[in-house]
Amino acid sequence: MWSRDRYKQMAEAVAMLYVKALKDMPPDVRIALQNAEQGETAPIGKTILGTIRKNIGAADRENLLICQDTGTPVYFVQVGEYAEANPVAIERAIRQGTERATTSHPLRSSVVSPITRKNPQTNTGYRVPVIHWDFVEDRDDVEVVVVPKGSGSENMTYFRMLLPADGVLGIKRFVLESVVGSGGNPCPPVIVGVGIGGSSDLCMLLAKKAIIRPCGERNPDPEVAGLEADLLQAINASGLGPMGLGGINTALAVHVEHAATHISQNPVAVNIQCWAARRGRLTIRSTGDLAIGF
């Protein structure tokens, strides 16, 4: 079993991971934004994309946050079946790391009580950080992906129980209406996460899970990948553009995750990620070695 020292080491690594995710743009998103700027045909859209890239450059040079909104800390944890780790202790280390990053850096605390609106100034609270678990076959490591989810994009979240008769066309219509209806609120160009199938709660989780995939990476299922391509084309044909002010780059990518569902259901969810698309990945190997990246 993991030692106490390893969990302490994990808490320290989570603190570094959270700060890294807030300061350092994933390479795949940098490339997507560069390609969007080069291909943008609307003058205002091209100017906005150029300003976004200047913002990223300033954050790199000055070691600053990419965006002032530190978001709600959301973690996706994968535990290998041979990992001799205690999930309760892992959760405790993630909370401690989040608190340490917030108070030591320091970071803006965005997490409050939904009733009193009291802010503990730690970016943690009751049931937050949000932690989603997966247990994976044939692995002995633990992987933690953090997504600091900003409010502008998270507020633009949608769910609907469509009828089976609505089919794929109904799914496309709902996604397109959701993204275009969001306008400039989620700071486009965005990554659009779509969940299809499952139960209502699983469908919402799938939509959020979709946004952590590397930007533009297709679903391995050819039919789902085709749906992603169709949705991206339709969204960018809307003309909404960067920051909702016009252009051909409303979305950098559309990622779809799916699950089997009930015969009488057709659930679909949309979770939008802003252009910053912040994320970080921590891998803890069976040897105790740590690796932080994207």
Image (cartoon, rainbow, N blue to C red):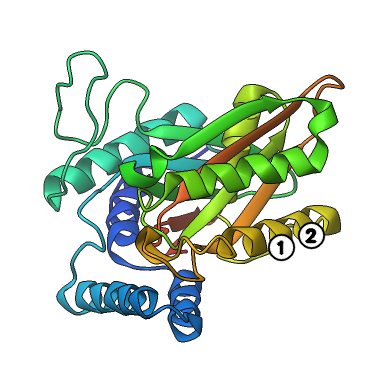
Quick check: 198 above or below 253?
above
Label 1 crowd (10 A; few <14 / some 14-19 / many >=20) = some
Q: Is mark 2 in CB contact (under 8 Å) with mark 1?
A: yes
Q: Residue at x 61, y 57 (%)?
A: 254
Q: Position of residue 152 (x, y in %)?
A: 33, 45
The quadrant in which residue 11 appears is top left
Amino acid identity at mark 2: Gly
Q: Residue at x 24, y 73 (%)?
A: 55
Front-lying residue, 110 or 288: 110
The answer to whether residue 79 of the structure is visible from this angle is no
Q: Is residue 186 visible?
A: yes
For label 2, the crowd category at 10 Å Cα-Cα, with few meaning under 14, some 14 to 19 and many 20 or more, is: few
Query: Residue 277, percent across and down?
Result: 42, 58
Whether residue 288 sits left or right of residue 258 in the image: it is left
Whole-number angstrom distance, CA of label 2 to CA of label 1: 5 Å
**Percent of width and height locating residue 203:** 64, 32
Q: Is residue 139 left or right of residue 149?
A: right
Exactly how many numbered labels are in the figure? 2
**Kind of residue indicated by mark 1:** Ala
Please provide percent x and percent y for residue 91.
42, 32
Q: Residue at x 53, y 34 (%)?
A: 158
Identify the element where label 2 is drawn. Answer: helix
Q: Is residue 161 above or below residue 22?
A: above
> For residue 118, what is the image quadrant?
top left
Instruction: Give the SS element for disc 1.
Output: helix
Q: Residue furthest bottom?
A: 38
> Label 1 belongs to which residue?
229
Does 158 appear above or below 47?
above
Q: Where is residue 92, by image quadrant?
A: top left
Residue at numbered disc 2? 226
